[in-house]
Image (cartoon, rainbow, N blue to C red):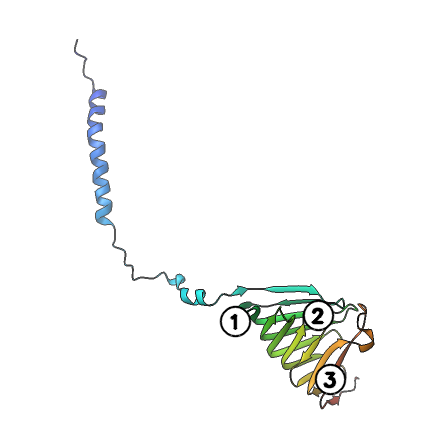
Amino acid sequence: MRRRDNPYSRFVAWAKIVLPLAALALLSTVFLLARNIDPTQAIPFAEIDVEELAREQRIRAPNYAGVTEDGAAISVTASTARPDPDSPERVDATDLEAELITATGARYQLSSQRGEIDSGADMAYLQGGVVVTTSSGYRITSDAMSTSLSRTLLESEGPVQADGPAGRLDAGSMSLAPLPDAEGDDSANHLLVFNKGVKLVYTPSD
């Protein structure tokens, strides 16, 4: 017996034909209206010198912290550091900040525009506008200074200028080290020495 046709069956039959055709038409429209991509247009915020990054390995915000043989705490930080290709134990750094706190509580803060950290020699070399601030009230400036990473030793590599409680002081060199008779004593005091043509302009306090 022949099944009776009805509107719902006719709708389903037509839908099986019309819907695939409509989907095909929409898909072809997408390809026709799509814009061509210009590969020569670079992304504004993606201008990166890949060759420079590959050539110069840089470390951002490196830091070093430790305790010296005579009990002083030392820390060194920088904005960036780049390993020396000729010596992996040395790194060139920019915007160095160092702090030395002796076992007796004296504090020395150092800053410079650039420098070098040599882990093999246990030394840090600061260059370019070196500034040393002491907890005793002195502000010392020099073109270059060096500090040990394993013991309390700070030396200038040229003339220094200092402003402090006693007034204005100019000298050919400066050094900070433990007292000679207190080496090996973790609680030893340290001596800040100015030499080589010291000139002091004394400013008496009120």
- From the viewer's perspective, is residue 160 above or below residue 59? below
Image quarter of residue 37: bottom left
The residue at 70%/87% (across/down) is 170
| Three-letter residue code for mark 1 | Asp
Question: Percent x, y for residue 141?
Answer: 65, 81
Q: Quadrant of the C terminus?
A: bottom right
Q: Which residue is mark 2?
A: 100
Q: CA distance from mark 2 to mark 3?
A: 19 Å
- Specify which label sits upstream in the sequence, 2 or 3: 2
How far apart marks 3 and 1 lie (CA) works out to: 35 Å
- Disc 1 versus disc 2: nearer the observer: 1
Residue 121: quadrant of the picture: bottom right
In the displayed orientation, state which residue is furthest to the left.
2
- The front one of 9 and 60 is 60
Q: Amino acid at mark 3?
A: Phe
- Amino acid type shown at disc 2: Leu
**Quarter holding residue 78:** bottom right
Task: Please indicate whether residue 127 sits to the left or right of residue 164 in the image.
Answer: left
Look at the numbered disc 3 and give the secondary structure of its residue.
Answer: strand
Label located before the other in sequence (1 or 2): 1
Q: Which residue is mark 1?
A: 86
Q: Is residue 48 visible?
A: no
